Amino acid sequence: MTTVIEKNQKNGRLEVGTPLLEVKDLHVEFHTRDGVAKAVNGVNYSVAAGETLAVLGESGSGKSVTAQTIMGILDMPPGKISQGQILYRGQDMLAMSEEDRRQIRGQKIAMIFQDALSSLNPVMTVGAQLGEMFRVHRGASKKEAREKAIELMERVRIPAARQRVGDYPHQFSGGMRQRIMIAMALSMEPDLIIADEPTTALDVTVQAQVMDLLAELQAEYNMGLILITHDLGVVADVADKIAVMYAGRIVETAPVHELYANPAHPYTKGLLRSIPRLDQKGQELYAIKGLPPNLLKVPAGCAFNPRCDVATDLCRSEIPTLHQVTDKDGKELTGRRSACHLWKETLHG
Ligand code: SF4
């Protein structure tokens, strides 16, 4: 029987909107001498072909652990997947054989890391590193692999690619190295790219160029993109939807522009207020008070309550569930969910 996904396939590429990856009720724990840290606590999200999901949160929120679990690069132990599913094109990767999983992770889902310099091999030329993928996975000759490497370098707009294919990573600037990482991720023409803080180490102008390049390539290849970041400012122009994480849980989801215009969770509100704005030059920059919780000692009730200006007794005793958000007339707002007891006041107040 032909599945919906197969029907949507065109020349090996998925049609925009076809479900690609779905994380379902994922729980990941770290077993330490001091106790069990629930790093990912019932996370659900999905991304379709041609869609960009930004996963936003401070360090320790679980955003990177979720990505590492998808990619199978989480250290286990101490990490442990205690529950959940990771569906790639409808098939649970956690229930697959190791070999099937490796095929998907090597060729269908690629990852871009924050620190290109430590992700690239310092004693191999970038051409050899880019070409290796074609030699290993596609059986290309040395010459063919070199040509493919040049093609990819040109694709990510590295100037004088043919002359620079024999250079080593340290001979490139930070921005150019990040382009090389993107080229490596693209080499197997994946369905999905997971980019973990891909521009954090770069200055603002180069950040924008790298984000634009990623967005352009994604549109061209119909890829899904999961963009992990702590910086709301980076994702405004490229993401379609956002999942905000705090202490291992998703606390708000929304289409990107709706979240910017009117957040439904006090934590998101605080993050938005923390973005420097040109029209507030000279004014003190807002910062959310306090620190993210220690995952071994998460506060009772809503984990954000010690840092929340509007917390009530209910917030200190009951964990808010992630539920559908409505407009003032009670009409459901598509894609909008909030895990806050006071979401109505936050959104409509
Ligand atoms: Fe603040 Fe309470 Fe909402 Fe948590 S549930 S974010 S403490 S208002």
Image (cartoon, rainbow, N blue to C red):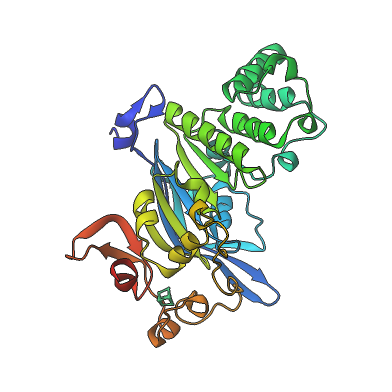
The residue at 54%/53% (across/down) is 231
The residue at 73%/33% (across/down) is 173
Of all residues, the one furthest to the right in this rendering is 123
The residue at 68%/77% (across/down) is 34
Query: Which quarter of the figure is the N terminus placed in?
Result: top left
Q: Quadrant of ligand 1?
A: bottom left
Which is more toward the observer, 3 or 337? Answer: 337
Of all residues, the one furthest to the front in this rendering is 282
Which is more toward the observer, 148 or 290? Answer: 290
Q: Is residue 24 visible?
A: no
Query: Which quarter of the figure is the C terminus placed in?
Result: bottom left
Q: Position of residue 259 (x, y in %)?
A: 38, 56
Q: Position of residue 106 (x, y in %)?
A: 58, 36
Q: Is residue 161 left or right of residue 56?
A: right
Q: Is residue 299 left or right of residue 310?
A: right
Q: Is residue 123 left or right of residue 197?
A: right
Q: Is residue 116 visible?
A: yes
Q: Position of residue 15 (x, y in %)?
A: 34, 31
The residue at 62%/37% (across/down) is 206
